[in-house]
Image: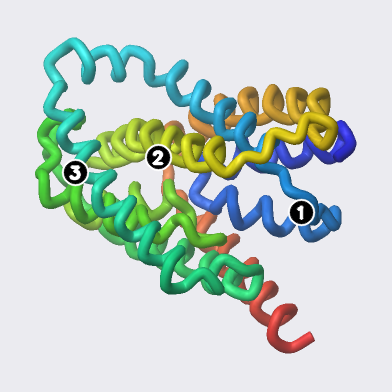
């Protein structure tokens, strides 16, 4: 892997991880374009570490409140969300591993677009709930976690799924976004553990410099995308992402099944 390709993939990971457009789906597209077929477990680990650090940096005060302040109940909510997430991921990988191929990608993007459109309709409601994560109901946490599990499939955006599910459940939009980003921390940690366990540390095959450069780009672009989406959801509709994903899904489905 060259440094230029690592920069592009790091940029894609950083931007798409938190924008509602699926980082895994876009990485699959770019890896196909660059004909990257070799194992990239070490590179993926660094990318996930970079995005994890960006969330922790931006949400450091909120994390401190959850761990040591008045919002300790959020820890229970996060655990409740992670339980169905892990169960769904394990079941999908065991029973429907063929869905992790590029042929499913268009349908994954279409699912993400659909939930954005539905969430946008609910986002227009006037909800008087305060921005307090600790007030999220246990049932809502379980539902968000259940649907989050399907984001393991390429093209299905984790942020789009979790935020819009929260909006549909009546959670205030800033709380929905904050909970989604805080929830990304245990999700990324779980993904890191899985990748580390499956990593083959064959040092001569690891391109350290490109991987490091890609991780730095992913970190910086993640900071940008988190702040961007927080501004969008507070002040504007993000239905434009749904339109983009719809057009992209149609193009991919046509290319995959017709040409």
Name the quadrant of the N terminus. Answer: top right
Front-lying residue, 150 or 161: 150
* Residue 145 visible (yes or no): yes
Q: Position of residue 101 (x, y in %)?
A: 62, 69
Residue at 15% from the left image edge and 33% from the top image edge: 76
Front-lying residue, 15 or 210: 210
Q: Name the quadrant containing residue 44.
A: top right
Label annotation for residue 187: 2
Q: Position of residue 181 (x, y in %)?
A: 38, 34
The residue that label 1 is drawn on is 31
Distance CA(mark 3)–CA(mark 1): 34 Å
The residue that label 3 is drawn on is 80
Disc 3 secondary structure class: helix
Q: Tell me if residue 132 comes above or below residue 61 in the rendering.
A: below
Label annotation for residue 138: none
Q: Name the quadrant containing residue 11.
A: top right
Q: Earlier in the sequence, mark 3 or mark 2?
A: 3
Check disc 3: other Cα within 10 Å, few if <14, some if 14-19, many if 20+: many
Residue at 70% from the left image edge and 27% from the top image edge: 217
Disc 1 secondary structure class: helix
* Residue 167 visible (yes or no): no
Residue at 22% from the left image edge and 20% from the top image edge: 66
Q: Is residue 18 left or right of residue 252?
A: left
Check disc 2: other Cα within 10 Å, few if <14, some if 14-19, many if 20+: many
Q: Tell me if residue 154 comes above or below residue 166 in the rendering.
A: below
Q: Earlier in the sequence, mark 1 or mark 2?
A: 1
């Amino acid at each position: 892997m060259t440094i230029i390709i690592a920069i592009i993939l790091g940029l894609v990971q950083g931007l798409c991880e938190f924008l509602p457009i699926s980082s895994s789906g876009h990485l699959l597209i770019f890896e196909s374009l660059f004909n990257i077929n070799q194992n990239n477990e070490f590179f993926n680990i660094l990318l996930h570490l970079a995005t994890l650090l960006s969330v922790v940096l931006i949400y450091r005060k909120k994390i401190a409140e959850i761990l040591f302040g008045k919002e300790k109940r959020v820890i229970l909510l996060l655990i409740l969300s992670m339980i169905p997430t892990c169960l769904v991921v394990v079941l999908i990988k065991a029973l429907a591993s063929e869905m992790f191929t590029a042929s499913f990608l268009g349908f994954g993007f279409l699912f993400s677009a659909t939930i954005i459109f539905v969430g946008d309709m609910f986002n227009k409601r006037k909800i008087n709930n305060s921005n307090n994560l600790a007030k999220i109901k246990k049932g809502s946490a379980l539902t968000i976690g259940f649907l989050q599990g399907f984001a393991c499939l390429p093209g299905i955006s984790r942020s789009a799924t979790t935020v819009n599910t929260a909006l549909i459940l009546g959670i205030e939009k800033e709380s929905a976004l904050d909970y989604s980003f805080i929830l990304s921390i245990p999700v990324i940690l779980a993904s890191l553990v899985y990748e580390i366990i499956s990593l083959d540390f064959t040092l001569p095959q690891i391109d350290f410099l490109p991987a490091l450069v890609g991780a730095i780009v992913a970190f910086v672009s993640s900071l940008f995308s988190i702040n961007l989406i927080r501004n969008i959801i507070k002040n504007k509709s993000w239905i434009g992402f749904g339109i983009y994903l719809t057009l992209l899904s149609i193009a991919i489905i046509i290319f995959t099944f017709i040409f």
